[in-house]
Amino acid sequence: MAETTAAVRFLMPTRPDVGLDLLAVGADDDLAITTAERTMTRAELRDRVDDTRRLLGDIRRLVFVSCTNTVDSLVAYLAAVAGGHPVLLLDGSGSEQAEAHRRNLVDRFDPDVIVDGSGEGDVIVDGSGEGDGGLRFEERRPGTRHALHPELAMLTSTSGSTGSPKLVRLSRRNLKSNAASIAEYLGLRSDDRAATTLPMHYCYGLSVINSHLLAGASVHLTARSVVDPLFWREFDHVGATSFAGVPYTFELLSGAGFADHVPATLRHVTQAGGRLPADAVRHYAGLGRDHDFRFFVMYGQTEATARMAYLPPELAEARAGTIGVPIPGGSFRIDGDDEGELVYSGPNVMMGYAGDAGDFALGQVLTELRTGDIARQHDDGLYEIVGRSSRFVKTFGLRVSLDRVEELLLEAGIDARAVACDERLAVFVRAERFVPAARDVIVERLGLPAHAFAVHAVDRFPRTASGKPDDATLVAHARRLEQVEPDDATAPASERIRELYAELLGRPDATADDSFVSLDGDSLSYVEVSVRLGRMLGTLPRDWPERGIRELAALVAPEPRATTAESAEPAGTNTKTARPRRRPRTTSMETSVLLRAAAIVLIVATHTDFIDVKGGAHLLLAVAGYNLVRFRVTGASGAARVTGLLRAAAWIAVPAVIWIGGVAMTTGFYDPSTAALLNGVLGQQSVWSEQWQFWFLEAIIWTLVGVAALLAIPWVDRFERRHPFGLALILLAVAFAVRVLVIGGIEAERVERYAVLSVVAFVVLGWLIARADTLTRRLIASAAVLVVAPGFFGEPLREAIVVAGCLLLCWMPVLRVPRVLVPTVVVLAASSMYVYLTHWQVYPPIEEVSPALATLASFAVGIVVWWLARVAGQGIARMTRASAAPSTSK
């Protein structure tokens, strides 16, 4: 039956009068589409669209398209609108959020056809037909069950929201008029080519495509981030002339040094999707003036198809902060005297909302759009948004504008987000150090008492799929933070793990698909996370940092429940009274955490002459290499890998330079080369002195820098991804050979034991162990341990410490330990770097009196310094990671 129906559809005449042809302008041989791999003329694109339109048939049907920024997705969309089929574009990224939204919309609105344009494969119609391209059709019925209004062309979720309970109904007139208006005020020409920096399913991203194709211009399809160097290589290669961005896009561009690398072909840049700070508008407008491109600030809503206003580029610097003038064909009025709700009229105003499938039959029910934004008009005719009608909270008897709160804090140099949590103001800042200052500003400038609001620090501000501020996530996070005693035991395992990551990594935007690695966890935070995860999971998987939260939640053992027989036991029978389940006396802990704690104890206790068991420092090098791979050499992009490695080096180098430099300036104890962590290069190379005390930190830092430089080479990065164990083995062989050449044999003497080139093999050894994920590879890694460590010191016990620790790490990455020891181990492991850094100044005056007391004092001081640095460091980490975060391209 399905095959017969498909065949009949091919024979039925088409009715182009009900569709919208966005490819009508332009010659056949004009370029329409470019990608990194191919180009497509307008004639070739029309042919693909026509073929797909015939597959969809002549009967108007409701079509859902799962799309990404690919030719297949674009063809499916253009075919649907050309054939007159009302179409809804869905996020085809495959994320859990996108899939949940897709299922919800399919269940609620029951499409007739679902087209997947986001993957690769043959065209499939009714599970049987084949053709060109990578489209997959799921025909759910031959015709349609819906009554579809003749003008209905498109459906979209409001503001790109994945949780919207209703859809926006757009007509052919809406789509065509808005695309034409945008093309007009941008001055698009046939030689313009826009790079897709936003997803196709987002109304702003789609408007870029519509306006360019309608004007006879072309589009470069890419899903790369604007901080990916390959994006700009493609941009230059295809001669792209424009790109679009939301505010977050421009934050990323500023951090990536865009001003120093403006493409020569760039003609115009557009910004929408939220308010860009006035200073940023002036910056990019001035940059455009200097580099001969025009910077357009635009204002719009999904309900107006896309755009309602734009700020002419020549006014951007002088009138930054305004939204400009209405687009051609549109008009504004303000519902009030001087200030009030902004109301828009124009041919691009939606037909109306669709709360269910029955609304698809409705015609135009709106003549104007109430935007919900509070605005005023200046004497020069330009409009300015001053607030959002829903962006207020009434607290302590005062009606407080959330936008005003953010503005006041920004004036004080604090980037913040304000939300209404029930009837309470909640403010989020990006570093703990900003919390007190934010409280002071709110109390002093708004007159609110301190108990009437809360200020919290987060790693970064969450965003929706379209790149806009995600207030809903912040509200939910505020509620969790303000719960005095959250009932963790009754929460789903995935939510408990998600909240654990949100708390310890400062990431309220964590989702069930995220992992420790994807949330940018590092060796400073993994100790506490791994321990608390071990308590929840019982047994901690070796690869837990790379596993998603949902996958880890599946490993949580369910709480035991009484059996039916037990629960039904009648009173008075001779049964034992049920006893509460005993808490296990042991818990799962990563071996690397235990080794880290044990190594620092051996190091300090040996230095104070409390014991004489050496080898802890070189074992700690292997542990560092082990964690280096797990947290920094991940599946992230090459740029993200390099940035992460350099950031990890900075996290060690900055506090080290501050401490050593401070000691050097106050006591003169250290040379400048030591404070600069360059003693191994510039210092005395033959005799041990106090200048060598920080050799361990030098080894770690310069190894991280070296690995970053190595992985910055594209072919090395590709080789590591294909052969991770193979590259580790090659690097270990090279490091070992270099060590033999440097020291002239196997055994090192004097400072040779601490020089970077001599000890880097221990770091790479940890790298190899981390990549040993099969029995064969563990055997090879074990053999490597027995080659690298024995003979290096000429001290059997010292070498045995390193060998035993490495083999334990290789074969038993997780151990069970008594719960009573966990708090001590966690503190020792987490503070190990600061204990090492500071103990050189603590123990010497005390060890002559009491080596035991000198050891305890060293740990006490190091732990206090670690705690203080942690408070300050978390804020710096949040800002650093936020500025370097990969674009969502939304």
Image (cartoon, grey):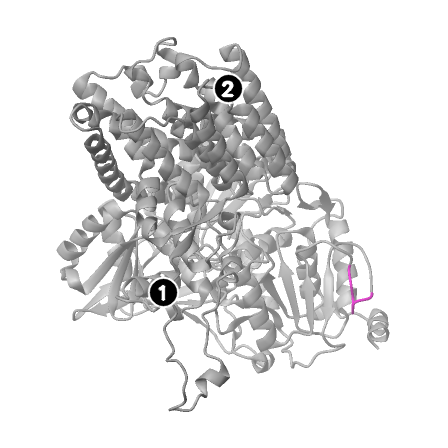
**Residue 701 sits inside the magenta stretch:** no
Q: Is residue 185 visible?
A: yes
Q: Is residue 286 left or right of residue 411?
A: right
Distance Cα–Cα, label 1 vs label 2: 58 Å
Q: Amino acid at mark 1?
A: Ala
Q: Is residue 274 visible?
A: no
- Could you say where residue 590 lies in the image, as x and y percent from the top left? 44, 46
- Could you say where residue 573 lies in the image, as x and y percent from the top left? 41, 89
Q: Residue at x 24, y 67 (%)?
A: 424
The secondary structure making up most of the magenta span is loop
Q: Residue at x 54, y 24 (%)?
A: 788
The secondary element bearing badge 2 is classed as loop
Q: Amino acid at mark 2?
A: Gly
Q: Mark 1 Cα within 10 Å, few/some/many (few <14, many 20+)?
A: few
Foreground tag (1 vs 2): 2
Q: Nearer the viewer, residue 339 or 4?
A: 4
Up-down relation of residue 785 to residue 157 (above or below): above
The secondary element bearing badge 1 is classed as helix
Q: Earlier in the sequence, mark 1 or mark 2?
A: 1
Q: In the picture, which quadrant includes the N terminus?
A: bottom right
Q: Quadrant of residue 606?
A: top left
Q: Residue at x 82, y 60 (%)?
A: 130
Q: Quadrant of residue 853?
A: top left
- Could you say where residue 872 lies in the image, as x and y percent from the top left? 26, 41
Which residues, given as a range, are shown in magenta?
Answer: 123-128
Q: Mark 2 Cα within 10 Å, few/some/many (few <14, many 20+)?
A: some
**Mark 2 lies on residue:** 791
Up-down relation of residue 593 to residue 733 (above or below): below
- Could you say where residue 104 lies in the image, as x and y percent from the top left? 56, 72
**Mark 1 lies on residue:** 476
Up-down relation of residue 235 to residue 140 (above or below): above
Q: Is residue 117 left or right of residue 483?
A: right
